[in-house]
Amino acid sequence: MSDTSESTSELVAEAPLTPSVDQQPDVSDPAKLIRLGTMLQTMLTELKDTETDDAGLMRLDQIRQETIEELGGILSDDLHEELLEFNACCGSDTPSESEMRVAHAQLVGWIQGLLRGMQATATAQAQMAQQQMMMMQAQMQQQRAVGGQPPAQGAQQARNSGPAVPDSGYL
């Protein structure tokens, strides 16, 4: 096995399948995250070759701010804080067209990175679950090979058969 796959296996083995009781999920509504990211990406594509007047820039800034507010409602506290840290790029004045494009591109990139992180976590969890299942199957096969039956069935048969009594021919 290569060093890469060994280190991946180690990471997978350490990844929890479910969050602990006191840990909130990173994103409470992944579908909403995807919708917001897609909307921003589409908007960037549409704006790529057009010039925007002041009213359009104000509207773009409003959309960006509303999107960040919407994201705040579905993100964990630490991710929301991270989002707000890089959002400080635009001041209170109406940003220039280039500032707005950079801000939107940065937001889209951040959302895409978050989605990729979620995909990587899901893949790691699936690999871990598959490894656990394979280990359980191997243990069951090993138990069957040693005792002929899984422990639960063997114990049940031992209880049902009772003590061995020689056949005396009577009754």
Image (cartoon, rainbow, N blue to C red):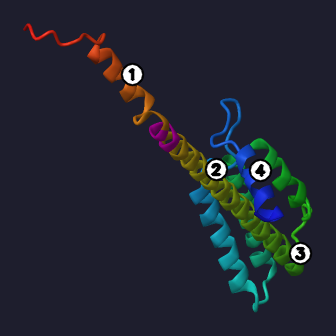
Q: Closer to the observer: label 3 or label 2? A: 2
**Front-most of 57 and 152?**
152
Marks 2 and 4 in Cβ contact (< 8 Å): no
Q: Closer to the observer: label 1 or label 2? A: 1
Residue at the disc numbered 1: 155
C-alpha distance separating marks 3 and 4: 43 Å
Marks 1 and 2 in Cβ contact (< 8 Å): no
| Highlighted magenta segment, given as a residue range | 141-145
Residue at the disc numbered 2: 128
Residue at the disc numbered 4: 10
Q: Closer to the observer: label 3 or label 4? A: 4
Name the outermost residue toward the bottom: 49
Residue at the disc numbered 3: 99
Q: In this view, does 116 lie above or below 135?
A: below
**One can see residue 62 in this view:** no
Q: Quadrant of the C terminus?
A: top left
Residue 26 point in image, percent of width and height: 70, 47
The amino acid marked with disc number 4 is Glu
Marks 3 and 4 in Cβ contact (< 8 Å): no
Label 4: which secondary element? helix
Of labels 2 and 4, earlier in sequence is: 4
The amino acid marked with disc number 3 is Glu
Residue 89 point in image, percent of width and height: 92, 64
Of labels 1 and 2, earlier in sequence is: 2
Q: In which quarter of the image is the N terminus?
A: bottom right
The amino acid marked with disc number 1 is Ala
The amino acid marked with disc number 2 is Met
Label 3: which secondary element? helix
Magenta stretch holds residue 143: yes
**Front-most of 61 and 105?**
105
Circle 3: is it few (<14), some (14-19), or many (20+) Cα within 10 Å?
some
Q: Which mark is residue 100?
A: none
